[in-house]
Image (cartoon, rainbow, N blue to C red):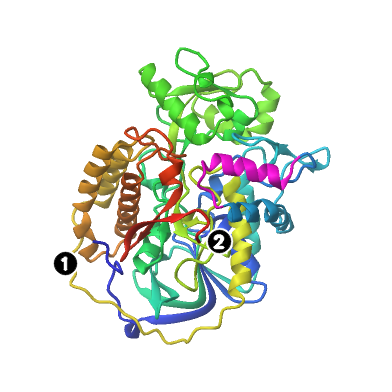
Amino acid sequence: MIPRYIVDFDPAALETVQTDMIIIGAGIAGLFTALQAAKDRRVLMITKKSLFDSNTRYAQGGIAAVISEDDSPEFHRQDTLIAGAGLCDPEAVDVLVHEGPDCVQALIQYGTHFDEEDGHLALTKEGAHSQRRILHANGDATGYEIVRALADKVQSVPNIEVWDDHFVLDLLTEEGECVGALVQKPDGSRVIVRGAATVLCSGGTGQLYRYTTNPEVATGDGIAMAYRAGAVIRDMEFNQFHPTSLCYPGAPRFLISEAVRGEGAVLRNIRGERFMDKYHPQLELAPRDIVARAIVSEMELTKSTYVYIDITHETPDLIKHRFPNIYEFCLNYGLDMTTDWIPVAPAAHYMMGGVRTDMNGESSIPRLFACGEVSSTGVHGANRLASNSLSEAIVFGRRIVERTRALPPLELEARTGYTSERIGAPAGKMAERRLKLQKLMVRFAGLRREAHGLTKGLEELRRQAPLYQTEMTTREAFEYANLLTCATLMMEAALMREESRGAHYREDFPDKDDLFWRKHTLMHRERGIGEEFIGDV
Protein backbone atom coordinates (compact mmCIF):
# COMPACT_ATOMS: atom_id res chain seq x y z
CA MET A 1 0.00 0.00 0.00
CA ILE A 2 2.80 2.43 0.89
CA PRO A 3 5.33 2.85 -1.96
CA ARG A 4 9.12 3.03 -1.69
CA TYR A 5 9.15 6.71 -2.72
CA ILE A 6 6.40 9.32 -2.69
CA VAL A 7 7.70 11.05 -5.84
CA ASP A 8 9.36 9.93 -9.07
CA PHE A 9 12.88 11.15 -9.78
CA ASP A 10 15.86 10.65 -12.09
CA PRO A 11 19.27 11.25 -10.45
CA ALA A 12 20.84 12.11 -13.79
CA ALA A 13 18.48 15.06 -14.16
CA LEU A 14 19.07 16.49 -10.67
CA GLU A 15 21.82 18.48 -9.00
CA THR A 16 23.84 16.46 -6.48
CA VAL A 17 25.39 17.94 -3.33
CA GLN A 18 27.98 16.05 -1.27
CA THR A 19 28.70 16.46 2.45
CA ASP A 20 29.98 14.36 5.34
CA MET A 21 26.88 14.26 7.55
CA ILE A 22 23.27 15.10 6.73
CA ILE A 23 21.04 16.09 9.64
CA ILE A 24 17.32 16.20 8.89
CA GLY A 25 15.50 18.42 11.38
CA ALA A 26 16.58 20.66 14.20
CA GLY A 27 15.54 20.78 17.85
CA ILE A 28 17.95 19.73 20.56
CA ALA A 29 18.74 16.47 18.74
CA GLY A 30 19.74 18.07 15.45
CA LEU A 31 21.51 21.10 16.88
CA PHE A 32 23.55 19.19 19.47
CA THR A 33 24.50 16.43 17.04
CA ALA A 34 25.57 19.01 14.45
CA LEU A 35 27.83 20.81 16.93
CA GLN A 36 29.43 17.58 18.06
CA ALA A 37 30.02 16.40 14.48
CA ALA A 38 31.27 19.73 13.16
CA LYS A 39 34.45 19.44 15.20
CA ASP A 40 36.00 17.32 12.43
CA ARG A 41 33.61 17.15 9.44
CA ARG A 42 31.19 19.05 7.23
CA VAL A 43 27.56 19.01 8.31
CA LEU A 44 24.45 19.95 6.35
CA MET A 45 21.34 20.64 8.45
CA ILE A 46 18.03 20.57 6.55
CA THR A 47 14.91 22.01 8.19
CA LYS A 48 11.48 22.37 6.64
CA LYS A 49 10.95 25.66 8.46
CA SER A 50 13.84 26.98 10.60
CA LEU A 51 16.28 26.06 13.37
CA PHE A 52 13.83 27.50 15.90
CA ASP A 53 10.78 25.43 14.91
CA SER A 54 10.74 22.18 16.83
CA ASN A 55 9.17 20.49 19.83
CA THR A 56 12.27 21.37 21.87
CA ARG A 57 11.44 25.06 21.69
CA TYR A 58 8.16 24.44 23.52
CA ALA A 59 9.60 22.18 26.24
CA GLN A 60 8.79 23.84 29.55
CA GLY A 61 9.63 21.53 32.41
CA GLY A 62 13.29 20.83 31.88
CA ILE A 63 15.95 18.20 31.35
CA ALA A 64 16.53 15.25 33.70
CA ALA A 65 20.05 14.42 34.88
CA VAL A 66 21.69 13.26 38.09
CA ILE A 67 23.25 16.43 39.51
CA SER A 68 22.44 16.42 43.23
CA GLU A 69 24.56 14.50 45.74
CA ASP A 70 21.29 13.12 47.13
CA ASP A 71 20.52 11.53 43.75
CA SER A 72 22.18 8.64 41.90
CA PRO A 73 22.12 7.00 38.45
CA GLU A 74 20.47 3.99 40.06
CA PHE A 75 17.59 6.12 41.37
CA HIS A 76 17.15 7.68 37.93
CA ARG A 77 17.32 4.24 36.34
CA GLN A 78 14.62 2.82 38.60
CA ASP A 79 12.29 5.78 38.03
CA THR A 80 12.70 5.42 34.26
CA LEU A 81 12.07 1.66 34.32
CA ILE A 82 8.95 2.04 36.47
CA ALA A 83 7.48 4.72 34.20
CA GLY A 84 8.30 2.63 31.12
CA ALA A 85 5.95 -0.13 32.36
CA GLY A 86 8.29 -3.05 31.69
CA LEU A 87 9.17 -2.12 28.11
CA CYS A 88 12.38 -0.11 28.56
CA ASP A 89 15.63 -1.56 27.29
CA PRO A 90 17.78 -1.70 30.48
CA GLU A 91 21.01 -1.13 28.52
CA ALA A 92 19.62 2.02 26.88
CA VAL A 93 18.43 3.33 30.25
CA ASP A 94 21.89 2.71 31.75
CA VAL A 95 23.42 4.72 28.91
CA LEU A 96 21.02 7.61 29.57
CA VAL A 97 21.42 7.88 33.33
CA HIS A 98 25.21 7.53 33.34
CA GLU A 99 26.05 9.74 30.34
CA GLY A 100 23.36 12.38 30.81
CA PRO A 101 25.20 14.58 33.35
CA ASP A 102 28.28 15.00 31.11
CA CYS A 103 26.08 15.91 28.15
CA VAL A 104 24.27 18.52 30.26
CA GLN A 105 27.66 20.05 31.00
CA ALA A 106 28.23 20.20 27.24
CA LEU A 107 24.96 22.15 26.89
CA ILE A 108 26.23 24.61 29.47
CA GLN A 109 29.53 24.94 27.60
CA TYR A 110 27.57 25.71 24.43
CA GLY A 111 25.96 28.66 26.23
CA THR A 112 22.78 27.29 27.83
CA HIS A 113 21.93 29.20 31.02
CA PHE A 114 20.07 26.98 33.48
CA ASP A 115 18.45 28.52 36.55
CA GLU A 116 20.50 28.63 39.73
CA GLU A 117 19.79 28.91 43.45
CA ASP A 118 22.50 30.04 45.86
CA GLY A 119 25.18 29.52 43.24
CA HIS A 120 24.11 25.96 42.37
CA LEU A 121 21.99 24.56 39.54
CA ALA A 122 18.33 24.71 40.58
CA LEU A 123 16.58 21.34 40.54
CA THR A 124 12.90 20.52 40.63
CA LYS A 125 10.83 17.36 40.74
CA GLU A 126 8.24 16.07 38.27
CA GLY A 127 5.77 13.21 38.03
CA ALA A 128 7.19 9.71 38.72
CA HIS A 129 10.63 11.08 39.72
CA SER A 130 11.77 10.08 43.20
CA GLN A 131 14.36 12.87 43.43
CA ARG A 132 14.76 16.51 42.42
CA ARG A 133 16.78 16.16 39.19
CA ILE A 134 15.07 18.44 36.66
CA LEU A 135 17.19 21.37 35.48
CA HIS A 136 15.20 24.29 34.07
CA ALA A 137 15.82 27.67 32.47
CA ASN A 138 13.98 30.99 32.81
CA GLY A 139 11.53 29.22 35.07
CA ASP A 140 9.45 27.35 32.53
CA ALA A 141 11.19 28.12 29.21
CA THR A 142 13.88 25.43 29.24
CA GLY A 143 13.46 24.31 25.65
CA TYR A 144 13.52 27.85 24.31
CA GLU A 145 16.77 28.60 26.14
CA ILE A 146 18.43 25.40 24.88
CA VAL A 147 17.40 26.12 21.29
CA ARG A 148 18.57 29.73 21.60
CA ALA A 149 22.00 28.71 22.83
CA LEU A 150 22.54 25.84 20.40
CA ALA A 151 21.16 27.69 17.36
CA ASP A 152 23.39 30.69 18.09
CA LYS A 153 26.38 28.37 18.26
CA VAL A 154 25.42 26.45 15.10
CA GLN A 155 25.16 29.68 13.11
CA SER A 156 28.71 30.60 14.09
CA VAL A 157 30.38 27.30 13.10
CA PRO A 158 31.88 27.32 9.56
CA ASN A 159 31.58 23.54 9.16
CA ILE A 160 27.78 23.66 9.50
CA GLU A 161 25.59 24.69 6.56
CA VAL A 162 21.86 25.20 7.21
CA TRP A 163 19.10 24.87 4.61
CA ASP A 164 15.92 26.42 5.99
CA ASP A 165 12.53 25.94 4.29
CA HIS A 166 13.66 22.76 2.51
CA PHE A 167 11.52 19.61 2.64
CA VAL A 168 13.16 16.17 2.69
CA LEU A 169 10.98 13.95 0.51
CA ASP A 170 12.68 10.59 0.95
CA LEU A 171 15.82 8.79 2.04
CA LEU A 172 18.00 7.33 -0.71
CA THR A 173 19.39 3.81 -0.43
CA GLU A 174 21.88 1.86 -2.51
CA GLU A 175 22.97 -1.74 -1.91
CA GLY A 176 21.19 -1.76 1.44
CA GLU A 177 22.83 1.42 2.78
CA CYS A 178 21.43 4.91 3.24
CA VAL A 179 23.38 7.26 0.98
CA GLY A 180 21.47 10.50 1.48
CA ALA A 181 18.16 12.17 0.73
CA LEU A 182 15.98 13.68 -1.97
CA VAL A 183 15.15 17.27 -1.04
CA GLN A 184 12.64 19.78 -2.38
CA LYS A 185 13.77 23.41 -2.38
CA PRO A 186 11.53 26.38 -1.56
CA ASP A 187 11.01 27.05 -5.30
CA GLY A 188 9.78 23.50 -5.92
CA SER A 189 12.93 22.23 -7.62
CA ARG A 190 14.69 19.16 -6.23
CA VAL A 191 18.23 18.22 -5.29
CA ILE A 192 19.99 15.02 -4.22
CA VAL A 193 22.15 15.26 -1.09
CA ARG A 194 24.67 12.51 -0.40
CA GLY A 195 26.63 11.90 2.78
CA ALA A 196 28.49 9.20 4.66
CA ALA A 197 25.89 9.42 7.44
CA THR A 198 22.27 10.60 7.51
CA VAL A 199 20.73 11.46 10.88
CA LEU A 200 16.97 11.82 11.35
CA CYS A 201 16.20 14.48 13.98
CA SER A 202 12.75 15.28 12.64
CA GLY A 203 10.64 15.00 15.78
CA GLY A 204 7.36 13.25 16.45
CA THR A 205 3.77 12.80 15.29
CA GLY A 206 1.73 15.23 17.41
CA GLN A 207 -0.21 16.56 14.41
CA LEU A 208 -1.91 13.18 14.10
CA TYR A 209 -4.34 14.51 16.71
CA ARG A 210 -6.65 17.50 16.71
CA TYR A 211 -5.53 18.46 20.22
CA THR A 212 -1.77 18.47 20.70
CA THR A 213 0.97 20.38 22.49
CA ASN A 214 3.18 19.99 19.40
CA PRO A 215 3.88 22.66 16.76
CA GLU A 216 2.62 22.45 13.17
CA VAL A 217 5.88 20.88 11.96
CA ALA A 218 5.38 17.63 13.96
CA THR A 219 3.99 15.54 11.11
CA GLY A 220 5.95 12.28 11.49
CA ASP A 221 8.07 12.89 8.38
CA GLY A 222 11.15 11.04 9.63
CA ILE A 223 9.28 7.93 10.74
CA ALA A 224 7.36 7.78 7.47
CA MET A 225 10.39 8.21 5.20
CA ALA A 226 12.41 5.69 7.23
CA TYR A 227 9.57 3.17 6.91
CA ARG A 228 9.44 3.71 3.14
CA ALA A 229 13.21 3.20 2.97
CA GLY A 230 12.95 -0.16 4.72
CA ALA A 231 13.96 0.70 8.29
CA VAL A 232 12.41 -1.19 11.19
CA ILE A 233 9.85 0.92 13.08
CA ARG A 234 9.12 0.01 16.70
CA ASP A 235 6.34 0.53 19.28
CA MET A 236 4.12 2.92 17.31
CA GLU A 237 1.17 2.15 19.60
CA PHE A 238 2.78 4.09 22.45
CA ASN A 239 1.85 7.74 21.98
CA GLN A 240 1.90 9.78 25.17
CA PHE A 241 -0.85 12.24 25.99
CA HIS A 242 0.16 15.04 28.33
CA PRO A 243 -2.45 15.22 31.11
CA THR A 244 -2.62 19.00 31.42
CA SER A 245 -2.96 21.25 28.40
CA LEU A 246 -4.94 24.48 28.67
CA CYS A 247 -8.59 23.91 27.71
CA TYR A 248 -10.21 27.32 27.46
CA PRO A 249 -12.42 28.95 24.79
CA GLY A 250 -10.36 30.93 22.29
CA ALA A 251 -7.00 29.65 23.59
CA PRO A 252 -4.73 27.08 21.90
CA ARG A 253 -3.90 23.82 23.66
CA PHE A 254 -1.00 25.37 25.53
CA LEU A 255 1.05 23.03 27.71
CA ILE A 256 0.72 23.44 31.48
CA SER A 257 4.01 21.87 32.51
CA GLU A 258 4.23 18.81 34.71
CA ALA A 259 6.56 20.93 36.83
CA VAL A 260 3.48 22.83 38.04
CA ARG A 261 2.32 19.62 39.72
CA GLY A 262 5.90 18.99 40.77
CA GLU A 263 5.78 22.26 42.71
CA GLY A 264 2.59 21.26 44.51
CA ALA A 265 -0.38 21.92 42.21
CA VAL A 266 -3.40 19.64 42.63
CA LEU A 267 -6.08 18.46 40.23
CA ARG A 268 -9.76 19.10 40.89
CA ASN A 269 -12.89 18.11 38.98
CA ILE A 270 -15.49 20.75 38.11
CA ARG A 271 -17.09 20.18 41.52
CA GLY A 272 -13.85 21.34 43.11
CA GLU A 273 -12.99 17.87 44.44
CA ARG A 274 -9.45 16.45 44.39
CA PHE A 275 -9.64 13.05 42.77
CA MET A 276 -6.19 11.54 42.17
CA ASP A 277 -6.33 9.61 45.45
CA LYS A 278 -8.88 7.35 43.72
CA TYR A 279 -6.42 6.42 40.98
CA HIS A 280 -2.84 6.22 42.27
CA PRO A 281 -0.87 6.49 45.54
CA GLN A 282 1.46 9.08 43.97
CA LEU A 283 -1.57 11.32 43.41
CA GLU A 284 -0.81 14.17 40.97
CA LEU A 285 2.76 12.90 40.53
CA ALA A 286 1.72 9.52 39.12
CA PRO A 287 2.99 8.53 35.63
CA ARG A 288 1.47 10.57 32.82
CA ASP A 289 -0.71 7.82 31.34
CA ILE A 290 -2.40 7.24 34.69
CA VAL A 291 -3.01 10.94 35.32
CA ALA A 292 -4.34 11.46 31.78
CA ARG A 293 -6.83 8.59 32.01
CA ALA A 294 -7.86 9.68 35.51
CA ILE A 295 -8.67 13.13 34.14
CA VAL A 296 -10.74 11.64 31.32
CA SER A 297 -12.62 9.47 33.84
CA GLU A 298 -13.42 12.50 35.97
CA MET A 299 -14.53 14.45 32.91
CA GLU A 300 -16.94 11.65 32.05
CA LEU A 301 -18.23 11.31 35.62
CA THR A 302 -18.94 15.05 35.86
CA LYS A 303 -20.04 15.46 32.21
CA SER A 304 -17.37 18.09 31.62
CA THR A 305 -14.74 18.76 28.94
CA TYR A 306 -12.03 19.69 31.43
CA VAL A 307 -10.76 19.51 35.01
CA TYR A 308 -8.86 22.15 36.96
CA ILE A 309 -5.23 22.43 38.00
CA ASP A 310 -4.93 24.46 41.22
CA ILE A 311 -1.73 26.02 42.52
CA THR A 312 -3.40 28.98 44.25
CA HIS A 313 -2.20 27.79 47.67
CA GLU A 314 1.36 28.76 46.68
CA THR A 315 2.55 32.35 46.99
CA PRO A 316 2.12 34.66 43.96
CA ASP A 317 5.86 35.37 44.03
CA LEU A 318 6.73 31.68 43.72
CA ILE A 319 4.27 31.12 40.87
CA LYS A 320 5.40 34.16 38.88
CA HIS A 321 9.09 33.37 39.42
CA ARG A 322 8.90 29.63 38.73
CA PHE A 323 6.38 29.74 35.86
CA PRO A 324 6.65 33.17 34.27
CA ASN A 325 5.70 32.10 30.74
CA ILE A 326 2.76 29.92 31.76
CA TYR A 327 1.56 32.71 34.08
CA GLU A 328 1.76 35.34 31.32
CA PHE A 329 0.15 33.10 28.72
CA CYS A 330 -2.83 32.29 30.97
CA LEU A 331 -3.14 35.94 31.96
CA ASN A 332 -3.54 36.87 28.29
CA TYR A 333 -6.78 34.87 28.34
CA GLY A 334 -8.04 36.30 31.62
CA LEU A 335 -6.78 33.46 33.83
CA ASP A 336 -4.61 34.31 36.83
CA MET A 337 -2.70 31.27 38.16
CA THR A 338 -2.23 32.96 41.53
CA THR A 339 -6.00 33.18 42.15
CA ASP A 340 -7.76 31.03 39.52
CA TRP A 341 -8.01 27.32 38.93
CA ILE A 342 -6.84 26.68 35.36
CA PRO A 343 -9.02 24.45 33.10
CA VAL A 344 -7.02 21.62 31.53
CA ALA A 345 -7.49 18.42 29.52
CA PRO A 346 -5.14 15.82 27.98
CA ALA A 347 -3.54 16.43 24.56
CA ALA A 348 -1.21 14.42 22.32
CA HIS A 349 2.34 15.12 23.41
CA TYR A 350 5.10 12.61 22.65
CA MET A 351 5.76 9.52 20.51
CA MET A 352 7.64 6.84 22.45
CA GLY A 353 7.96 4.64 19.37
CA GLY A 354 9.75 5.43 16.13
CA VAL A 355 12.79 4.31 14.15
CA ARG A 356 14.41 1.43 16.00
CA THR A 357 18.05 2.10 16.81
CA ASP A 358 20.91 0.37 18.57
CA MET A 359 22.96 1.83 21.41
CA ASN A 360 24.79 4.08 18.92
CA GLY A 361 21.64 5.51 17.36
CA GLU A 362 21.99 3.47 14.14
CA SER A 363 18.84 2.13 12.50
CA SER A 364 18.44 -1.26 10.80
CA ILE A 365 19.69 0.45 7.61
CA PRO A 366 23.48 1.04 7.71
CA ARG A 367 24.48 4.73 7.65
CA LEU A 368 20.97 5.82 8.71
CA PHE A 369 20.72 7.12 12.27
CA ALA A 370 17.87 8.53 14.33
CA CYS A 371 18.01 10.84 17.33
CA GLY A 372 15.38 12.41 19.57
CA GLU A 373 11.65 11.81 19.34
CA VAL A 374 11.84 10.23 15.88
CA SER A 375 13.90 7.37 17.35
CA SER A 376 13.09 4.35 19.45
CA THR A 377 16.24 3.80 21.51
CA GLY A 378 14.55 1.72 24.19
CA VAL A 379 14.85 4.41 26.87
CA HIS A 380 11.19 5.37 27.16
CA GLY A 381 9.48 1.99 27.02
CA ALA A 382 5.69 2.22 27.08
CA ASN A 383 5.55 5.60 28.82
CA ARG A 384 8.27 8.27 28.84
CA LEU A 385 9.43 9.56 32.21
CA ALA A 386 9.03 13.34 32.33
CA SER A 387 12.06 15.36 31.10
CA ASN A 388 13.97 12.30 29.89
CA SER A 389 13.46 13.24 26.23
CA LEU A 390 15.92 16.15 26.13
CA SER A 391 18.53 14.03 27.95
CA GLU A 392 18.05 11.17 25.51
CA ALA A 393 18.59 13.46 22.51
CA ILE A 394 21.99 14.74 23.64
CA VAL A 395 23.25 11.40 24.99
CA PHE A 396 22.48 9.49 21.80
CA GLY A 397 23.42 12.44 19.59
CA ARG A 398 26.93 12.27 21.01
CA ARG A 399 27.01 8.48 20.54
CA ILE A 400 25.90 8.85 16.91
CA VAL A 401 28.79 11.22 16.22
CA GLU A 402 31.30 8.79 17.74
CA ARG A 403 29.90 5.90 15.68
CA THR A 404 29.93 7.82 12.39
CA ARG A 405 33.61 8.66 12.72
CA ALA A 406 34.33 5.08 11.68
CA LEU A 407 32.28 5.25 8.45
CA PRO A 408 34.11 5.37 5.10
CA PRO A 409 33.19 8.13 2.63
CA LEU A 410 30.68 7.62 -0.17
CA GLU A 411 31.16 7.81 -3.90
CA LEU A 412 29.81 11.02 -5.39
CA GLU A 413 27.69 9.57 -8.19
CA ALA A 414 24.01 8.92 -7.44
CA ARG A 415 22.68 5.87 -9.26
CA THR A 416 19.24 4.89 -8.00
CA GLY A 417 16.09 6.55 -9.38
CA TYR A 418 12.40 5.73 -9.22
CA THR A 419 9.50 5.80 -11.67
CA SER A 420 5.89 4.67 -11.33
CA GLU A 421 2.53 5.27 -12.94
CA ARG A 422 1.23 8.20 -10.91
CA ILE A 423 -2.23 9.56 -11.64
CA GLY A 424 -2.93 13.29 -11.42
CA ALA A 425 -2.84 15.58 -8.41
CA PRO A 426 -4.29 14.63 -4.99
CA ALA A 427 -8.02 15.27 -4.71
CA GLY A 428 -9.49 17.63 -2.12
CA LYS A 429 -7.96 20.25 0.12
CA MET A 430 -5.13 18.95 2.28
CA ALA A 431 -6.26 21.02 5.28
CA GLU A 432 -9.66 19.31 5.21
CA ARG A 433 -8.14 15.85 4.80
CA ARG A 434 -5.74 16.52 7.66
CA LEU A 435 -8.52 17.63 10.02
CA LYS A 436 -10.57 14.56 9.13
CA LEU A 437 -7.56 12.34 9.89
CA GLN A 438 -6.98 14.07 13.23
CA LYS A 439 -10.61 13.55 14.27
CA LEU A 440 -10.38 9.90 13.22
CA MET A 441 -7.31 9.39 15.40
CA VAL A 442 -8.94 11.07 18.42
CA ARG A 443 -11.99 8.86 18.05
CA PHE A 444 -10.36 5.48 17.42
CA ALA A 445 -6.71 5.70 18.57
CA GLY A 446 -6.76 8.16 21.45
CA LEU A 447 -6.29 7.63 25.16
CA ARG A 448 -8.57 4.59 25.14
CA ARG A 449 -8.86 2.06 22.35
CA GLU A 450 -10.69 -1.16 21.47
CA ALA A 451 -10.65 -3.63 18.57
CA HIS A 452 -13.86 -2.54 16.83
CA GLY A 453 -12.84 1.11 16.68
CA LEU A 454 -9.26 0.35 15.61
CA THR A 455 -10.51 -1.94 12.85
CA LYS A 456 -12.97 0.68 11.65
CA GLY A 457 -10.29 3.35 11.77
CA LEU A 458 -7.87 1.23 9.75
CA GLU A 459 -10.50 0.63 7.10
CA GLU A 460 -10.96 4.37 6.72
CA LEU A 461 -7.19 4.97 6.56
CA ARG A 462 -6.76 2.33 3.87
CA ARG A 463 -9.41 4.01 1.76
CA GLN A 464 -7.00 6.96 1.60
CA ALA A 465 -4.21 4.81 0.09
CA PRO A 466 -4.72 6.04 -3.53
CA LEU A 467 -3.11 9.30 -2.37
CA TYR A 468 0.30 7.60 -2.51
CA GLN A 469 -0.06 7.08 -6.27
CA THR A 470 -0.80 10.72 -7.08
CA GLU A 471 1.66 13.36 -8.25
CA MET A 472 2.28 15.31 -5.06
CA THR A 473 4.17 18.59 -5.28
CA THR A 474 3.23 20.62 -2.19
CA ARG A 475 4.52 20.44 1.37
CA GLU A 476 0.93 20.08 2.60
CA ALA A 477 0.45 16.96 0.48
CA PHE A 478 3.76 15.41 1.54
CA GLU A 479 2.97 16.07 5.21
CA TYR A 480 -0.46 14.52 4.85
CA ALA A 481 1.05 11.43 3.20
CA ASN A 482 3.49 11.10 6.09
CA LEU A 483 0.73 11.56 8.68
CA LEU A 484 -1.37 8.94 6.90
CA THR A 485 1.57 6.52 7.00
CA CYS A 486 2.17 7.09 10.73
CA ALA A 487 -1.55 6.81 11.53
CA THR A 488 -1.73 3.47 9.74
CA LEU A 489 1.33 2.13 11.57
CA MET A 490 -0.02 3.32 14.91
CA MET A 491 -3.44 1.75 14.46
CA GLU A 492 -2.01 -1.54 13.19
CA ALA A 493 0.34 -1.76 16.18
CA ALA A 494 -2.42 -0.79 18.63
CA LEU A 495 -4.73 -3.45 17.19
CA MET A 496 -2.04 -6.10 17.49
CA ARG A 497 -1.16 -5.36 21.13
CA GLU A 498 -4.00 -7.01 23.05
CA GLU A 499 -3.19 -5.66 26.49
CA SER A 500 -2.95 -2.33 28.31
CA ARG A 501 0.55 -1.04 29.08
CA GLY A 502 1.80 2.48 29.67
CA ALA A 503 0.35 4.95 27.18
CA HIS A 504 -1.47 2.18 25.26
CA TYR A 505 -4.83 1.38 26.87
CA ARG A 506 -7.25 -1.19 25.45
CA GLU A 507 -10.73 -1.15 26.98
CA ASP A 508 -11.25 -4.71 25.72
CA PHE A 509 -7.91 -5.81 27.25
CA PRO A 510 -7.60 -3.57 30.34
CA ASP A 511 -4.83 -5.53 32.10
CA LYS A 512 -1.09 -5.64 31.52
CA ASP A 513 0.02 -9.08 30.27
CA ASP A 514 3.69 -9.65 31.12
CA LEU A 515 3.47 -13.32 30.19
CA PHE A 516 2.80 -12.68 26.50
CA TRP A 517 3.18 -8.98 25.76
CA ARG A 518 6.39 -7.86 27.47
CA LYS A 519 7.93 -7.30 24.07
CA HIS A 520 8.21 -4.68 21.35
CA THR A 521 6.07 -4.33 18.24
CA LEU A 522 8.11 -4.17 15.03
CA MET A 523 6.94 -2.95 11.63
CA HIS A 524 8.70 -3.23 8.27
CA ARG A 525 7.41 -2.20 4.84
CA GLU A 526 8.19 -5.57 3.24
CA ARG A 527 8.19 -7.99 6.16
CA GLY A 528 5.04 -6.64 7.82
CA ILE A 529 4.40 -6.63 11.56
CA GLY A 530 6.37 -8.66 14.09
CA GLU A 531 7.74 -8.65 17.61
CA GLU A 532 10.99 -8.35 19.53
CA PHE A 533 11.75 -9.30 23.11
CA ILE A 534 13.43 -6.82 25.44
CA GLY A 535 17.16 -6.53 24.82
CA ASP A 536 17.13 -8.21 21.40
CA VAL A 537 18.41 -5.17 19.43
Residue at image coords 50%, 42%: 383
Q: Judging from the image, what secondary structure is the residue with disc 1 in?
A: loop
Task: Say which amino acid is labelled 2.
Answer: Gly
Counting from the top left corner in percent of width and height, residue 332 is at 52, 29
206 or 228, nearer to the observer: 228
Q: Dot 1, crowdedness within 10 Å: few (<14), some or many (≥20)? A: few
Q: Quadrant of residue 83?
A: top right
Compared across the picture, whether 108 is left or right of 26 comes to: right
**Which numbered disc, 2 or 1, marks the residue that appears first in the sequence?**
2
Evaluate whether residue 430 shows in this view. Answer: yes
Please give the range of residues in magenta. Answer: 71-89
Compared across the picture, whether 13 is left or right of 423 comes to: right
- Quickly name the residue at label 2: 30
Residue at image coords 52%, 44%: 86
Compared across the picture, whether 95 is left or right of 462 comes to: right
Counting from the top left corner in percent of width and height, residue 116 is at 77, 41
Counting from the top left corner in percent of width and height, residue 3 is at 27, 66
Compared across the picture, whether 350 is left or right of 526 comes to: right
Counting from the top left corner in percent of width and height, residue 202 is at 47, 58
- Quickly name the residue at label 1: 423
Residue at image coords 50%, 29%: 291
Magenta stretch: residue 76 in it? yes
161 or 332, nearer to the observer: 161
